Image (spheres, rainbow, N blue to C red):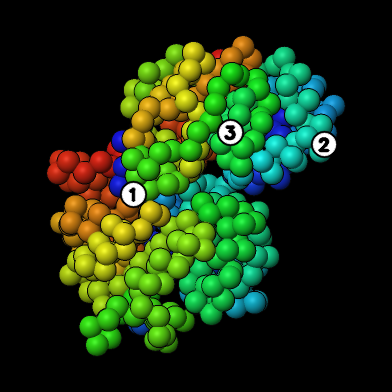
């Protein structure tokens, strides 16, 4: 049986891991390669690296980091942040990334999703959506959540699927960093109505939150950052709990 | 031991190379027919789409090189599918090393592609020596090889399909053994040591 995936996310700035609260207030959390290795050893199913300050000069640092990560870890990983073209994708995939994650650039240029899918296959295109509720409507935000758009989250998600996106990484800005649980309603809406996997992100605070997002919202995977980095939840313990609650997870 | 990793347009050779290096194996990454024909073992990886991968192999006559090999060969993912007779993906005639058809998952399987970790079972080859039944491996695919006399491991995604195939010196796995954690590394090691 296909298992539910647990995905630690590492936000990278200048080559080190950082994690903020509500997209602000960055706090240091260690060496990404070391963390990645530890996660792979303790049962993470996949990893996501987001370069949150991707600029042209830092690009080389990121590529070098991707190379180092791919040598060390034996599970799939996704790299995101500042990807604007098919060429950016080629560089990351050729350095050992399995998938790339695009966000703002997909909103401003939806054709990019199709181009990447045609060139490298849908399986490597993760489209990230930062969603925030404005006047009762789940609305897409870009640029690290700073800019609201006119797009409704569900409609955008359907377009992503039609354009060849392979997976959706859905982050609820209303929940991110609050540790009060994932956004069950919007995650459920997307996961139950789309034919591509939905990775829920934002709001994980304890084991029950993961159980709920899989059981109630039918998420295919759940992503979290700080609770893993600061060891508030250990992946083996989380998986044991989910397994005891009849949720299929990979155990080592 | 000289091991050739076939270099072609279907993507993930770098990941396979890294996985092999992690278990202490240093292959030659090559699309040179002579180097492939002289290797003691050959690995044929891949991510991508069947017809364009097949086109690429044909244009360099690598299909002829692969089918003529007498040493152990391991196909991975699209590598498995290209060893079969035919794939429904863009109606592609493959290398026909095994009389097996590759079909698209039906809707009842769930989301397509299947992305993530699924279990393997019912092992019939030394390729799975010391691998516990129902171990998890990492899959990304929309098409799968039907169960056949060549099936040496099975998985289930709405229906049973071949997780791995073997005929004579040709071995193949549908999952990404290079991304399947310790289990995947053990399977690669088994291929190097026991196949």
- B52 or A213: nearer the viewer: B52
Task: Give the number of the mark in front: 3 or 1.
Answer: 3
- Per the image, the residue denoted by label 2 is B60
Residue drawn at x 37%, y 43% as measured from the top left: B107
Judged by depth in the image, the label closer to the viewer, 2 or 3, is: 3
| Relative horizontal placement of residue B96, taking residue B58 as reference (left or right) | left
**Same-chain check, marks 3 and 1:** no
- State yes or no: discs 2 and 3 in contact (Cβ < 8 Å): no
> Observer-nearest residue: B59 or A132?
B59
Using the numbered discs, state the Cα–Cα distance from disc 2 to disc 3 in whole angstroms.
20 Å
Indicate the secondary structure of the residue bearing disc 2: loop
* Chain hosting mark 1: A
Q: Which residue is mark 3?
A: B87
- Give the CA separation, mark 1 to mark 2: 39 Å
In the rendered view, tell whether residue B25 sits above or below residue A199. above
Q: Return the residue found at the far front.
A: B91
Residue at mark 2: chain:
B
Residue at 66% x, 31% y: name it: B93
Callout 1: SS? strand
Residue B114: % across, % down: 42, 43
Callout 3: helix, strand or loop?
strand
Q: Position of residue B124 (x, y in %)?
A: 45, 14
- Tell me which residue sits at (18%, 56%) in the image: A216
Position of A251 with respect to B128 (left or right) is left
**Image quadrant in which you'd find residue A185:** bottom left
Q: Residue at x 58, y 58 (%)?
A: A117
Mark number displayed over residue A109: none
Q: Is residue B88 left or right of residue A156?
A: right
Which of the marked residues, 2 or 3, is nearer the chain's N terminus?
2
Q: Which mark is residue A5?
A: 1
Task: List x then y, in percent, for residue A65.
Answer: 57, 60
């Amino acid at each position: 049986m296909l298992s539910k995936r647990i995905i630690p996310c590492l936000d990278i700035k200048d080559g080190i891991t950082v994690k903020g609260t509500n997209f602000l207030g960055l706090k240091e959390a260690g060496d990404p390669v070391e963390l990645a290795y530890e996660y792979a050893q303790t049962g993470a199913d996949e990893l996501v690296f987001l370069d949150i300050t991707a600029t042209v000069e830092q690009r080389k640092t990121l590529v070098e980091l991707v190379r180092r990560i791919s040598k060390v870890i034996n599970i799939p990983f996704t790299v995101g942040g500042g990807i604007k073209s098919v060429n950016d994708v080629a560089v990351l995939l050729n350095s050992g990334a399995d998938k790339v994650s695009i966000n703002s650039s997909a909103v401003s240029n939806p054709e990019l999703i199709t181009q990447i899918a045609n060139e490298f296959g849908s399986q490597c295109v993760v489209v990230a959506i930062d969603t925030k509720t404005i006047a009762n409507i789940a609305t897409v935000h870009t640029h690290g959540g700073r800019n609201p758009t006119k797009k409704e989250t569900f409609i955008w998600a359907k377009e992503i699927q039609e354009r060849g996106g392979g997976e959706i990484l859905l982050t609820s800005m209303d929940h991110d960093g609050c540790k009060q649980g994932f956004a069950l309603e919007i995650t459920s809406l997307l996961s139950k109505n789309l034919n591509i996997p939905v990775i829920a992100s934002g709001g994980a605070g304890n084991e029950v939150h993961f159980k709920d997002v899989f059981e109630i919202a039918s998420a295919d995977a759940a992503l979290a950052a700080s609770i893993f980095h600061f060891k508030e939840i250990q992946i083996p313990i989380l998986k044991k709990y989910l397994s005891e609650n009849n949720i299929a997870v990979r155990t080592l | 031991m000289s091991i050739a990793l076939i270099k072609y347009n279907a993507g993930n050779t770098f990941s396979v190379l890294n996985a092999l290096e992690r278990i202490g194996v240093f292959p030659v990454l090559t699309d040179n027919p002579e180097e492939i024909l002289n290797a003691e073992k050959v690995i044929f990886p891949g991510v991508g789409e069947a017809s364009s991968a097949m086109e690429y192999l044909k244009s360099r006559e690598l299909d002829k090189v692969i089918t003529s090999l007498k040493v152990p060969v391991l196909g991975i993912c699209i590598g498995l599918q290209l060893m079969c007779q035919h794939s429904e993906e863009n109606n592609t005639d493959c290398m026909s090393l095994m009389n097996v058809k590759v079909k698209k998952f039906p809707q009842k399987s769930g989301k397509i592609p299947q992305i993530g970790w699924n279990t393997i079972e019912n092992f019939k080859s030394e390729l799975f020596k010391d691998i516990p039944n129902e171990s998890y491996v990492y899959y990304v695919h929309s098409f799968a090889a039907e169960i056949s006399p060549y099936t040496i491991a099975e998985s289930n995604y709405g229906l049973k399909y071949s997780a791995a195939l073997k005929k004579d010196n040709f071995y193949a796995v549908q999952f990404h053994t290079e991304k399947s954690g310790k289990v995947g590394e053990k399977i690669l090691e088994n291929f190097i040591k026991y196949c």
